[in-house]
């Protein structure tokens, strides 16, 4: 036993650096002396860096090879050694020392390759991975054209996993609430309840080997830790479980050890207070730890009922966005820091409480951050409309099993998507996918995204892409018109999207219409009590195939651009969160931006208690959310309906009634012009003519004085946002003449450790009043002083609609590195250059 005790502790060794890569997989890749066509790369890696737009998706479709040499230590003999790949797109074949060991047919889940019996100990071993990213393979999601780029490469991290021969193969934890939640306050931070923890352990089959009979005296020690305090400790001797039936099942690979624990005074995991506990399970023999399995878990009760979704026994409306895992230039290949950043943007900037990982499982780093932030997750198997042959379906069924087993310990995940996105009914196929998900995880509901009404419902939740809103009708259809299955929950899995593509540099009226469409759908979603949730399409713009998008290989469906800068629609979501003050006004008030100079509708997006509006420092009106036409939305957009105020009471000596009559007419004409006046306005105009003896010349003069500004001095509008009686934000709209840069950097402290780190820089060009220069389209020079960073993609910052960005990647050199971004020389504003200093640790 002595050698066993000394050599079986679990280790994970990152293998992300010093890979060689070639776009051409051939027999020569196994010859280490052959370096022709190879380049040095680090993981995560994309096969080909793409342009921002206008590129052919064929450029990343290759049968490529990755190669790396590692040393397998002599002291590792007697342990299990495996290569773990977190994500390889899309078909991967793994070789060790020239021998083919494993083929994986999913680009979106992790896989392990056991090399214990194949490794040469005490010597160098060569790993070769054939990575086929061509889209004509008979594996999901391929089959037909897909509305997103699929990219290629070893785009998630790689590691060498070392454990004892006796080790945990898997651990499945089901933490639930088993009593009513007791709250001393209105928040869940102080809530407590009784909880239940069900556990399933699966062990390696080395128990059946006579060499390890002595380990049958080992035990499983379970610890539940709150911060650093152990709040629950249990021991389970293996001898209590091992019998002939157990060993027989173990040999077949399906032996489980099951236990259940009741725990007092647990704080629930919730969207408002996502409390997580650390679960540590140790496999021990005497005083030696043979193996350790550690994960974060959250205790919560998530239920889908006929009338909606319930979290911890309270009804909660799920408000989310869909997310692709892609980025400009490098597609899927971004490290953990960027994955976490997207979760933070969704939660803190966009203010949603849920995300759908369309249309595939996504990075564990992203899901971990969702756990930490209380962001609900609807995740699903890879696929887009197409269902293939039996071999294809078998891969999809395996994808369900892999998705569930790899992600089921995450508190944030509330739904398994077990249908191919927007596919037709296939009951035989979907009975199998549902059965697999339910067998492997009995604690969560299943769903399947469809575009069909009243389709076959084998899942627990009917999820439907409702694109019925066209800007003139109801925001969404009622549940009863979509599904006759009234006894099951219903979710809108996508809305808007392709119904109204919007670029950051589109006209003001187009950008506003995009925002208002999102508001209308959300408003009607909240009105329908029996719709459990709604996921907007989508978080940000993304590259797509030639058959979709705007002809330049981009789908402009996001509420953000590809660099995660907010379009106007983003403020609809952002205003609904209450953490960060928000104030945005939809118009620049430049009349030349509007047909016939008529302003049309202008909206205020805010979560302030009230907004005071001033014109040329004269108070016009104070708006509150009672003025919003979106009555079902928390902090819905507020329509600006007054550009005059009560100034005519003083300046023109009007009575209150005359002021209101004239003001109503002036405000209408200011927004919509003189043509086709409605009866209501004609009636008010008639009052002015008959009761107050006004002429058309009088009305025109008043319009020019209080509303119009043709040929006069420019008008300045100021909006002040108040919270709890205090002014917290100010937006000023007036003529601008100078521009400056505003940079939002994800972090200036980067750590090059397991692999490279990345900083995202979001760049905005603004005027001197801090308004976005919406029609500034250019590329800005970027300069790096120091050895620590390199630019991902072009060496200039792309700016479209006044917004853009770049990504900086560490180079494995500890340093202080300065980065400078400049506006073109012709702009004479202040802060036309911005400099950042980065600290890179290795």
Image (tube, rainbow, N blue to C red):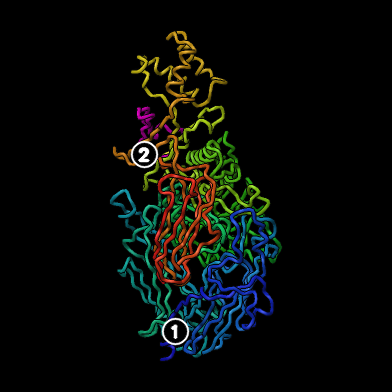
Which of the two residues, 255 or 280, is positioned nearer the viewer here?
Answer: 280
The magenta span reads: 605-629
Mark 2: few/some/many CA within 10 Å (<14, 14-19, 20+)? some
Q: Residue 238 appears at what percent x and percent y?
A: 43, 80
Mark 1: few/some/many CA within 10 Å (<14, 14-19, 20+)? many
- In the displayed structure image, the side of residue 600 where residue 266 appears, left or right: left
Check residue 8 in the rendering and tell me which mark sits there, or answer none.
1
Q: Residue 681 appears at what percent x and percent y?
A: 50, 18
Q: Earlier in the sequence, mark 2 or mark 1?
A: 1
- In the displayed structure image, the side of residue 644 where residue 45 appears, left or right: right
Determine if residue 797 is in view.
yes
- Residue, disc 2: 730
The alpha-carbon separation of the residues under discs 2 and 1 comes to: 62 Å
Which of the two residues, 775 or 412, is positioned nearer the viewer here?
Answer: 775
Q: Residue 272 appears at what percent x and percent y?
A: 38, 52
Which of the two residues, 615 or 91, is positioned nearer the viewer here?
Answer: 615
Element type where label 1 sits in the image: loop
């Amino acid at each position: 036993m002595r050698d066993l005790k000394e050599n079986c502790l679990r280790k994970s060794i990152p293998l992300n650096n010093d890979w060689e890569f070639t776009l051409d997989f051939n027999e020569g890749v196994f010859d280490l002396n052959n370096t022709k066509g190879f380049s040095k790369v680090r993981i995560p890696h994309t096969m080909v860096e793409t342009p921002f737009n206008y590129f052919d998706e064929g450029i990343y479709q290759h049968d490529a090879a990755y190669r790396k040499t590692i040393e397998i230590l002599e002291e590792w003999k007697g342990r299990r050694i495996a290569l773990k790949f977190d994500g390889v797109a899309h078909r991967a074949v793994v070789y060790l020392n020239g021998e083919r060991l494993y083929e994986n047919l999913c680009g979106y889940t992790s896989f392990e390759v056991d090399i214990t019996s194949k490794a040469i100990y005490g010597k160098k071993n060569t790993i070769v991975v054939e990575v086929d990213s061509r889209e004509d393979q008979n594996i999901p999601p391929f089959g037909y054209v897909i509305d997103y780029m699929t990219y290629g490469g070893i785009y998630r991290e790689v590691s060498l996993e070392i454990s004892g021969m006796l080790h945990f193969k898997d651990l499945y934890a089901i933490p639930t609430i088993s009593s009513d939640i007791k709250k001393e306050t209105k928040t869940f931070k102080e809530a407590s309840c009784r909880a239940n923890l069900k556990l399933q352990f699966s062990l390696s089959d080395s128990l059946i080997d006579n060499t390890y009979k002595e380990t049958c005296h080992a035990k499983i020690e379970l610890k539940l830790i709150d911060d650093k305090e152990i709040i629950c400790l249990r021991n389970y001797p293996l001898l209590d479980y091992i019998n002939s039936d157990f060993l027989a099942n173990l040999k077949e690979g399906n032996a489980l050890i099951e236990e259940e624990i009741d725990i007092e005074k647990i704080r629930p995991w919730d969207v408002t207070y996502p409390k997580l506990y650390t679960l540590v399970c140790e496999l021990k023999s005497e005083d030696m730890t043979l193996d350790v399995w550690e994960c974060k878990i959250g205790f919560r009760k998530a239920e889908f009922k006929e009338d909606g979704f319930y979290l911890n026994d309270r009804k909660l409306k799920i408000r989310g966005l869909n997310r692709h895992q892609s980025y400009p230039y490098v597609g899927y290949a971004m490290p953990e820091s960027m994955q976490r950043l997207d979760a933070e943007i969704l939660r803190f900037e966009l203010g949603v409480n849920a995300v759908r990982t369309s249309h595939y499982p996504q990075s564990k780093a992203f899901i971990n951050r969702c756990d930490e932030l209380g962001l609900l997750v609807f995740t699903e198997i890879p696929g887009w409309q197409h269902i293939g042959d039996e071999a294809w379906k078998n891969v999809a069924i395996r994808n369900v099993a892999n998705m569930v087993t790899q992600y089921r310990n995450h508190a944030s995940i509330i739904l398994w998507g077990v249908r191919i996105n927007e596919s037709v009914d296939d009951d035989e196929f979907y009975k199998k996918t549902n059965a697999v998900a339910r067998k492997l995880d009995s604690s969560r509901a299943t769903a399947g995204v469809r575009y069909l009404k009243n389709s076959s419902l084998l899942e627990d939740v009917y999820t439907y892409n409702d694109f019925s809103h066209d800007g003139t009708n109801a925001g969404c259809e009622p549940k009863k018109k979509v599904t006759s299955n009234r006894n099951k929950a219903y979710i809108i899995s996508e809305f808007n999207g392709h119904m109204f593509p919007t670029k950051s540099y589109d006209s003001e009226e187009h950008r506003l219409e995009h925002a208002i469409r999102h508001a209308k759908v959300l408003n009607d979603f909240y009105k329908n009590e029996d719709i459990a949730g709604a996921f907007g399409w989508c978080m940000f713009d993304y590259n797509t195939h030639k058959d979709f998008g705007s002809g330049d290989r981009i789908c402009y469906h996001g509420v953000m651009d590809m660099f995660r800068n907010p379009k106007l629609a983003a403020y609809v979501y952002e205003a609904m969160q209450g953490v960060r003050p928000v104030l945005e006004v939809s118009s620049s008030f430049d009349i030349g931006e509007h047909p016939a100079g008529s302003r049309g509708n202008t909206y205020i997006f805010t979560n302030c208690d009230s907004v005071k509006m001033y014109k040329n420092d004269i108070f016009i009106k104070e708006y509150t959310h009672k003025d919003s036409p979106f009555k079902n939305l928390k902090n819905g957009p507020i329509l600006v309906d007054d550009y005059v105020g009560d100034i005519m009471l003083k300046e023109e000596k009007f009575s209150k009634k005359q002021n209101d009559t004239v003001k109503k007419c002036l405000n209408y004409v200011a927004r919509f012009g003189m043509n086709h006046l409605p009866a209501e306005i004609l009636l008010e105009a008639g009052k002015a003519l008959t009761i107050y003896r006004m002429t058309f010349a009088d009305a025109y003069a008043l319009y020019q004085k209080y509303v119009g500004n043709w040929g006069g001095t420019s008008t300045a509008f100021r909006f002040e946002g108040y919270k709890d009686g205090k002014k917290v934000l100010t937006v000023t709209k007036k003529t601008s003449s100078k521009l400056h840069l505003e940079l939002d950097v994800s972090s200036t402290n980067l750590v090059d450790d397991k692999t490279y780190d990345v900083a995202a820089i979001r760049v905005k060009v603004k005027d001197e009043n801090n308004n976005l220069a919406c029609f500034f389209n250019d590329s800005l020079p970027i300069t790096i002083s120091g050895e620590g960073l390199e630019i991902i993609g072009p060496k200039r910052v792309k700016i479209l609609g006044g917004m853009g960005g770049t990504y900086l990647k560490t180079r494995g050199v500890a340093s202080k590195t300065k980065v400078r971004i400049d506006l073109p020389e012709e702009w004479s504003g202040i802060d036309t250059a911005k400099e950042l200093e980065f600290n890179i640790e290795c």
